[in-house]
Image (cartoon, rainbow, N blue to C red):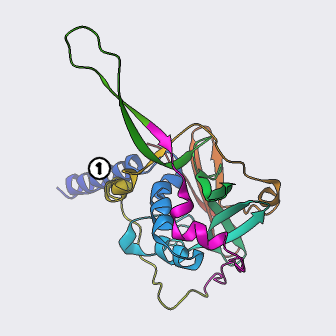
Amino acid sequence: MRNYFTTVLIVFGMSISLGQEKDAPEFAGENFSLEGALTMLKKASTIEEFEQLINDERNDINNLDLNNDGNIDYITVEDVIEKDSHVLVLTALVGENEKQDIATIVIEKTGNEEARLQIFGDEDLYAENTIAEPFETNEKMGAEKGPAMPEIITNRIVVNVWTWPSVRFVFAPGYQVWISPIRWAAYPRWWKPWRPIRHSLFIGRCHVHKVYFHRTPTRRVVVHKSYKTRRHTSTTVVKSKRGTTVIHKGRAGKVRAVHTRRR
C-alpha cells in the first residue's frame, strides 16, 4: 500500500511539472507585454512616470523572473538620443552586476508635429524580428459588383504619435535626458516585487493591451548604432532556435539549473 501511494505522489508531481513546462512560453520575453509597454507610454506624461507604470503590478505588463529568484524583475528605462530619434531602452535588473535588455522603443520625429514609433523585443528574449506598434483603422467602400451591397474594406494605418504627452515631452526644449537611477537591490520605496504567475494567466490579463497595438513584420524606424554599443546582455540568458534558455547560477558562479522555455 505504501508503494502504491508513493507511486501516485511521484506521478502527480511529474504531472504538475509537465503542466508548468507546457505553460511556459517558447521565448522568455513573452512574459513581458510589448503592447502593454506602449499602452503605458501613451498614458505617461514623462519617461519617469512611464518607468513607474511598467513596473506597477496592477497594469499587467511584466511577468519576468529571468534570474529565477521567485520575484518579478525590476525594469529600468534609459533614453538614448541620436539626431531626431529617441531610443527608450527597457532593461531588467537580474543581478548585482548583470542586466538584460528586454526591448527598445524607437521614436522618430518625421515632421513639424509628426512622429512614429515601434517597440522591438530584444533578440535574446523574443523570436527574431518581434515588433509591435500602434495602429488605427480606416474604412472605405469597395467597388460595387452587381446588385449586392458594396464591400467595406478596412485598412490599418500607421499612427502619428506626436499627440502622446510622453512623446512631446522628450522632444520639448530643455528636456533632461532620462537615465533611471534605480540599481540592483536599491529599488524605489513605491515598488514591491511580486511573484510571477502562470504564463497562460498572464497572457489573458494583458490581452487588453492588444486592442490598439499589434505585431508587425515591417520595420518603420531604425535602431541607431549609438544604442547597439550600449546594449546589455546577461550570461543567464541564452537564445537558440528552440527558444530561450535561462541559466541559473549560484553565488559561487556554479550553474545549478538550466531551464529551456518551450510551448
Residue at image point 32% right, 59% down: 205
Rendering coords of residue 130 (x, y %): 57, 44
Residue at the spot x=21%, y=56% of the render?
5
Question: Quick one: 12 or 113, which is closer to the camera?
Answer: 113
Q: Could you classify mark 1 by the number of other residues whose Cα lies within 10 Å: few (under 14), some (14-19), or many (20 or more)?
A: few
What secondary structure is marked by label 1?
helix
Instruction: Residue 198: give x, y in percent of width and height.
Output: 36, 59
Asked which quadrant contains residue 225, the reply is bottom right
Q: Residue furthest top?
A: 146
Residue 182 drawn in magenta: yes
Q: Which residue is the extreme one toward the left?
A: 1
Residue at the spot of label 1: 11
- Asked if residue 62 can be seen in this view, the reply is no
Residue type beneath disc 1? Val
| Quadrant occupied by the N terminus | bottom left
Looking at the image, is 164 positioned above or below residue 108?
below
- Where does residue 169 sit, x and y in percent of width and height? 61, 73
- Nearest to the observer: residue 117 or residue 150: 150
Magenta part, dominant SS? loop
Residue 188 shows up from this direction: yes
Boundaries of the magenta span: 156-185
Would you say residue 60 sits in the magenta stretch? Answer: no
Q: Nearer the viewer, residue 232 or 130?
A: 130
Residue 114, by quadrant, is bottom right
Image x and y of residue 259, in percent: 54, 53
